[in-house]
Image (cartoon, rainbow, N blue to C red):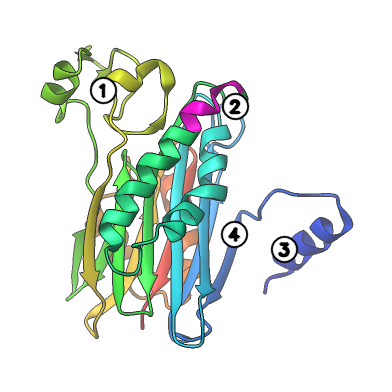
Amino acid sequence: MTAREILHKMKVKAGFSSSPPDTGKGKGKITKHITHGFHLVKGKASHPMEDYLVSQFKQIDDKNELGLFAIFDGHMGHDVASYLQSHLFDNILKEPDFWTEPLTAIKRAYDKTDAEILEKTRVLGRGGSTAVTAILLNGQTLFVANVGDSRAVLYKNGEAKQLSIDHDPGTEKKDIENRGGFVSNIPGDVPRVDGQLAVARAFGDKSLKMHLSSEPDVTTEDIDDSTEFLILASDGLWKVTSNEEAVDSIKQIKDAQTAARHLTEAAVSRKSKDDISCIVVRFQ
C-alpha cells in the first residue's frame, strides 16, 4: 500500500474525507496471481471530476470469487456516475439468475438501474453516464458489458482484442431516428443525439431518453494461459490512444497500478483534456 493510500484511509477514518483515492491496487484472495491497479486524472474542464470507477475482488464463499471492475464516465454532472459506482454491481449480483444466466442478468440489471436513475432525477439531476463493466468469475471467465464509449480491451494471444462496442450516434443513426430523434453532423464536431450528446447509449439523460438507448452490449471471454491483461478506460484515454498503442505501451510493465498510471499520464501528454480513468487487470 502506498503512503498516499494510507493517508487517505487515515483521513476517512478520522472523518475528514469520503472521496475515493485516485490511485490504488489489489489482488484476489483466492486468485492471488491476478492483480489489478487503477489511476484517475481530472481533465482541464472547470467542472468537478465526472469519472468514477470500481476495482476490487469480492469473495462470495470458500470457492467463488468475483473480480468487479468498472468505469463510469458522467456528463452534465457527476451524480449519475457516482450512483452507478455505488449501485450497479449490487443490482447485478441481486439478480436471481446471475449464476445461471449471467449475460441475461447483467442486461436486466442495467435496465433496472437506468429506471432507478430516471426515477431519482430530482436528486441526481438530468445528466447521465456511460459505463463499461467487467465481472471476472474465479479468474476463469470474463463478462463484459457497456453503454457508451468507455472501452474494454484485452491483450490475448499477443493481440489487442476490443471486448466492448463504442456506441457512436453516427453508427446508430437509424435507430435514433426510428425513436423520433435526430443526429446532428456539424462540420468540425462529432455526431450528437438531438445535437447534444456524443454517445448513442447511456444511463440517465432523462430529456433525451426517448431517443437514447441504455441497452448494453454484453460478451463473454474465457481467460486462459494466453491472456495477459485487461484495460478498462474512459474515452479520455481512447480519444488519443489506439487499442494497439495502449497494449504495446504497458505489456512490459508487470505492476498493474504502474501500468494504469502510465496510460493515463501518456494520454495527458498527448493533450487529452477530458477526465481520464483507467483500470489494468493482470492475469499473469
Above or below, 105 relative to 256: above
Dot 2 and dot 3 residues touching (CB under 8 Å): no
| Quadrant the N terminus occupies | bottom right
**Amino acid under label 3?**
Arg
- Mark-to-mark CA distance, 2 and 1: 21 Å
Residue at the image point whose x is 70% and y is 48% from the top: 19
What residue sits right under mark 3 in the picture? Answer: 4
- Mark-to-mark CA distance, 2 and 4: 20 Å
- Mark-to-mark CA distance, 3 and 4: 9 Å
Side of 152 where 175 appears, left or right? left
Dot 3 and dot 4 residues touching (CB under 8 Å): yes
Dot 3 and dot 1 residues touching (CB under 8 Å): no
**Amino acid under label 2?**
His
Q: Farthest residue in the left direction? A: 174
What residue sits right under mark 1 in the picture? Answer: 190
Work out whether mark 2 precedes mark 4 in sequence or the reverse, and give the earlier one: 4
What residue sits right under mark 2 in the picture? Answer: 47
- Tell me the element at label 4: strand
